Image (cartoon, coloured by chain):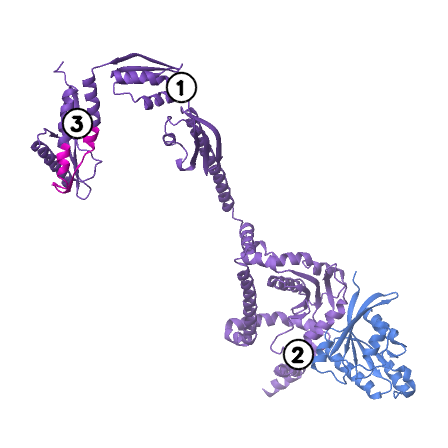
Amino acid sequence: MTALARKICMLGDFGVGKTSLVERFLRSTFDEKYKTTVGVKVDSKEVVLDPEGSLKLVVWDIAGKSALDALNQQYLRGASGLLLVADGTREATLRSALGLLMQARELLPDPKSVLLLNKLDLVERWEVAPGTLSELRRSLPVFETSARTGDGVEAAFAELARRLMA
Amino acid sequence: MAEFERLRQLLLGQEQERLDSIEAKQGSLPQRLPEALEEATRRRGKERMAKAIAGPVAIALGQAVKDNPQTLVDALFPIIGPAIRRAIAEALRDFSEGFNRALESSFTPKGLGWRIEAWRSGLTYAQVVFSHTLKFRIDHLFLIDRESGIVLHRESAPDRQDLDADAIAGMLTAIGDFVRDSVGKGGGSLASATVGENLLWVIEGPRFNLAAFLRGVPPAHLRTLLELKLESLHADFADPSRDLQAGTADAGAAFAEGMQLPALERAAIEPPPAERKPPRRWPYVLIGVLLVAAIAGWWWRGHVWQMGVDATVERFAHEPGYVLTQIESQRWTSLVIRGLRDPDAGPPEHLLTDLPIDAKQVHLDLRAMISPDAAVTKARARRLLQPPEGVDLAIDTDGTLHLRGIATQAWIDNATSHAAWIAGVNAVDSSALSATADTKIQAREQLRTLRKTIESLRVDFDHDTQVVDPAMVDAMAANLKEAAALASAARWTLHVEVFGAADTSGNETLNRGLRQARAAWLVEALQQRGITAQPAADVPATLLLRTAGVRLLLEEDHSTP
């Protein structure tokens, strides 16, 4: 039987590593060259959870923006989950991610959300204070990830999948 | 009165305040209602809200349409116009494609074959053309949730490589959103796309989209089928609360129904049974009858020909003086008869009359021979002996020639001496032959010859009774005088009858008068030259010339010994 499928959207400011995270999640690869996403790129991957079963994640990698325009709002339609991505070395991108979450909640009934603070491999240059992270963890799951090394990526996607199956 | 008011205030004061408050709230309801509706639609209970107001809204809408239909027409006009235009454009495009294909193939042998197939199957000619010319395959068919872009069901041809259906469906949805957002403000959407030999069709619905990945040239009817399928799915899954996520067992079976690719491909080139005309049986009957008639005609013609051949061969085989050596029959064309013929046998042309075969189709290749047949031998003896009138020839089976009658002694001597030399004659029997006096016999012989000469003479007329050559009358009179002398010696009585003739230039009444006048003129002219003659009672109808002539009648003269 076909696995259940859920649409999830990657949201975050430009350059935070959304596409790299998707590449790491889907194909376990990382490209040092920066690629700008135009519009949206859709991929899918089946996640197997124990003991919940399997779930197919249809990942919509939406072009990075600090706010959702009309077209991006259309891309969000029907999404069950959100992967909010921020760049740990740029605190402003965290604010953008939270702003995007607020906007998305206006459009979606009850999106499951996970926050990814990316570029863990550059943790020495992070601007986000640990206290801020602690505060955020009270309201939504937060994962410190690195698309370059793959740290935390699988776990973040798996957590979102688990929440979608709950 | 004041006390009554005060008492009422004491008894009903609280209730009055509550009523005032309710009335105040009701008064401000129009201002608060939109806000309350917005609040309700933002919260979780928006589905309940929608269900609650669905009934009253439907009733109100129906009443509004009944009371003021023009308002609804005005409101729908911007939607209906483009929809109608799109439908007409689609129909015209389909018609144009079909017309072009049908026209291109109309007058070719292949086109004629398709016409026979259409006539046999009860389909229209265009449908048969499409079924042969539209080679196409459906590689994949995705049923996509319009909102999320998730594939709810998919069908793929077994020989096509697997695709990441969810990713493709998601991208299609995103592209559709992009197209709609950027260029489809008037309600348009991405309907089709072409990549190399691959064609993509997207059929959109309010809840689901169908995406078909095709190769070749699909018929327009396929799109209609897909649209019908999408409409039926919307009807089946009208309940928005039903879980339609991909992979749910209940929806999967319903989605799969009617979406099998081979069935769709067949249905696309074969119209539904309602569009088929019942097969016409009478052409088969007609063809059968024509076939039987043709076979019967062919057989009958051959039979008649063979009958003709048999009759011809039989006639030649039984005719004395003929021997057939070879018969070559080319059915309905020619009959060649090869063989031998005695020159004294009957002419072959006479044997070809009254046959079931056309005489022109019979070709004779006959070589000469001498036949011992009695009839031919008799004819040969008659030719060689030239018996006078009054002499009969007969030949029996052993080849004996019997001569009977009266002849001059000279002829008898000549005949008996030569007859034995005639081929086929073994012996001569002249015992029944007797000689007569020479003068009478000779006179009669000479008169017979002269009679032929006289009866061949003609007195021609220029017009009416104006004779062309009067000397001809003198010649005729001289011959008649000689005939009269010979008749006397032959002991015959001679009667001369005169007849006239006319050509066909006048009517019968005029010509009859001319014939009588010319006969009378010649009677008189002969009388002037001493010849007694009478006009003939009958005039030969076949002589269509401006002429006149005589006939001699000879009777035995019994008055002299």
Q: What is the secondary structure assignment of the residue under circle 3?
A: strand
**Span shown in magenta:** B450-476
Left or right, residue A93 beside residue B410: right
Residue B304: x %, y % from top left = 44, 33
Q: Residues within 10 Å of mark 1 (few under 14, many from 20)?
A: many
Left or right, residue B341 beside residue B44: left
* Co-location on one chain, circles 2 and 3: yes
Q: What is the secondary structure assignment of the residue under circle 1?
A: loop
The residue singled out by tag 3 in the image is B552
Residue A34: x %, y % from top left = 82, 82
Determine the residue positioned at 35% across, 23% down.
B379
Quadrant in the rendering for residue B251: bottom right
Q: Is A104 placed above or below B229 here?
A: below
The residue singled out by tag 2 in the image is B181
The residue singled out by tag 1 in the image is B424
Three-letter amino acid code of the residue under disc 1: Gly
Residue B150: x %, y % from top left = 74, 69
Q: Chain of mark 2?
A: B
